[in-house]
Image (spheres, grey):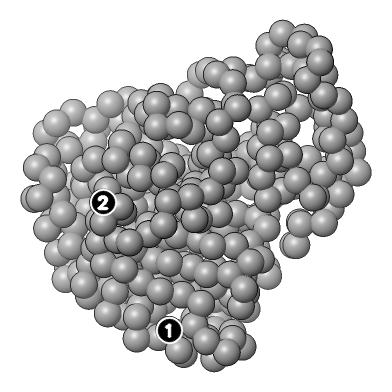
Amino acid sequence: MNSKLTYSQVQDYYGKVLKSSDDLKTDACCTDEGLPSYLKPILSKVHDEVLMRYYGCGLVLPEQLEGARILDLGSGAGRDVYALSALVGATGEVVGVDMTEEQLAVADQYRDYHAEVFGFDKANVSFKKGFIEQLDQLELEPNSFDIIVSNCVINLSPDKRAVLEQCYDLLKPGGEIYFSDVYSERRTPQHLIDDEVLWGECISGALYWNDFVNLSKECGFKDPRLVKSRPLAIENAALQEKLGDRRYFSATYRLFKLDDLEPACEDYGQAVIYKGTVAHHADKFVLDEHHVIETGKVFPVCGNTWRMLADTRFAEHFDFIGDWSNHFGIFEGCGTSMPFSTQDDTTAIADNNGGACC
């Protein structure tokens, strides 16, 4: 698909065709099942017009946000930006990037409104118009963001490699991309990629999951971690007929910018103990679907997982056991089959984050 044509189609679809989430034809990008209870009073303060123009797939909500600097790719009318602004607090900052004029106009007019309802002396958010493949043209400082989030948007990009490469440059060492998006179980043929409605509905632009994993590694994110997933229900009969028996999944991944990660999960006899001190996560910390770490329990980890906890903003919340002096081979339990659950089970991971597009 021609990139210029793609941009104009997406701008028209989200700026002019869609008036609310009710206009979407699939469930890829529009439900909030599993939102944690502490988030609900925050969302209740977000302006109604901002909420009405929301087309995302669940709020992407990583842990430990106080004071963080966050970039939201494809921020639309700003719902996620404003919710995150409440969680980063007055010392944090959230920057939203979107290419759709109509969406940005809605977002920008409520900056002062949300600063007041969240109790800040001044707005801690800003919005920039631009393409997520061209972040280097938006005067954003390299190595300056703690977290980059995106809510069912990267699949809409015609150049996903450029998006990931730009994100890597903007993240601080130890920072992460934490984002929800759509993936396919196999590569999508060109005639479906060229379908404007399927692309706008976040389906035909989805990467084959293994292509995404390999692309992430090539862009510097050496060990992509799946947090949560579910199968998409394509309930529109006409769209389902076009897709046939192809399966698509909504998923949340986290990608850390850590130079010392290894290609595989290696065993050094290490373990961690979670202190239970991350806000809103007293009982357990969920790094990904394979690492649900209960408070106070000695939890064996591979070397990569150790670094994801020790060399990031999470370090103060863990005690670390072991070192790097002995290597015991590959860490058991790391598979290479399709990572996504084929069951529509939104309770597989407790509702600690509300992240996977569900």
Indicate the position of residue 322 as horizontal and vertical percent values: 86, 25
Quarter of the rendering containing residue 126: bottom left
The vertical placement of 49 against 330, above or below, is below
**Quadrant in the picture for the N terminus:** top left
Indicate the position of residue 176 as horizontal and vertical percent values: 54, 46
Q: To which residue does mark 2 refer?
A: 134
Furthest residue in direction top, as rendered: 329
Indicate the position of residue 253 as horizontal and vertical percent values: 51, 41
Tag 1: amino acid:
Arg
Q: Which residue is found at the position 59% from the left and 75% from the top? A: 86
Density class for disc 2 (Cα within 10 Å; few <14, some 14-19, many ≥20) is: few
Q: Which residue is found at the position 30% from the left and 30% from the top? A: 246
Q: Which is more toward the observer, 113 or 256?
A: 256
Q: Secondary structure at mark 2?
A: loop
Residue 253 vs residue 126: left or right?
right
Looking at the image, is mark 1 or mark 2 earlier in the sequence? Answer: 1
Q: Secondary structure at mark 1?
A: helix
Q: Is residue 54 visible?
A: no
Indicate the position of residue 293 as horizontal and vertical percent values: 78, 40
Q: Which residue is found at the position 9% from the left and 42% from the top? A: 2
Q: To which residue does mark 1 refer?
A: 111
**Disc 1/disc 2 C-alpha distance (Å):** 24 Å
